[in-house]
Image (cartoon, rainbow, N blue to C red):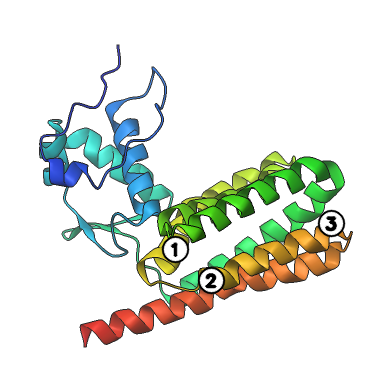
Amino acid sequence: MPRRLPSPRDTALAARLPDVPSAGPGATLAVQLADRLREAVMRGDFTLGEALSELKLAAAFGVSRTPVREALTTLQREGLIDIRPQSGSFVFLPSEEDVAELAEFRSMVEVQALRLACARRREPLLAQLKAAADDMDAALALDDRSAVAAADGRLHQAIVDNSANAYLSSAYRLVAGRVGALRTHNLVVTGASHARSQGEHRAVIAALLKGDLAGAEDVLSEHIWRMRLAYRATLARREGGAA
């Protein structure tokens, strides 16, 4: 019978690994640990570029280094962890060019997904977009930046999910972790403007309600590309702090 991840021995480290929904009765220790590490990176509990020690993670949870190494390898395939020979494992730290390519990919996928969603699942799409935007407003009112980022992610995921195209959904999953981590870092860690992002979300919804799909696509594309500008500011701040 598969083992459940033991209670952590290092409570300080464990506090940075949030609980996540059960991965199922067949989940191995490596899968459970990968799920918690993924969520921690996406929530900003670990900073971009931060070193992650196999030894400390294994000791904290009372497991061998093997499931820890497997979990880190899984996240490496997802682009969330950078494993460097003779150096160790690090949370990914993209260049501005990397983020530009990511924005380009997102724009192609999400804009096409929006077209398909409007044609195939318009009402569920609008309902989910409104619900996510309302959640974001509530989080903004409470200044809960983690909740803001989570609601933002749900809004974009709704666009892809309602495309009813398994290949688009699969393609989006390739970058969803990195997008979530960058979103959190830009919105939460650096204090980037939430209001502008939310205004663009509302503008997409308003255009769709008027039947202006082209207008919604233009706003969505511009909104996605703004991620690059926000990350450029993040890098500038990071370099300034290191000076």
User: Which residue appears at 31% of the width and 41% of the height?
Assistant: 18
What's the mark number on residue 227? Answer: 2
Mark earlier in primary sequence (3, 1)? 1
Mark 2 falls on what kind of element? Answer: helix
Mark earlier in primary sequence (1, 2)? 1
Q: Is residue 167 left or right of residue 34?
A: right
Name the one closer to the observer, 154 or 166.
154
Give coordinates of residue 185: x percent, y percent. 40, 64
User: Which residue appears at 43% of the width and 81% of the height?
Assistant: 233
What's the mark number on residue 182? Answer: 1
What kind of residue is marked 1?
A: Leu
User: Which residue appears at 61% of the width and 63% of the height?
Assistant: 105
Mark earlier in primary sequence (2, 3)? 3
Mark 1 falls on what kind of element? Answer: helix
Name the one closer to the observer, 118 or 138.
138
Vertical side of 9 occupied by 49: above or below: below
- From the image, tell me which residue sits under label 3: 209
Give coordinates of residue 177: x percent, y percent. 46, 51
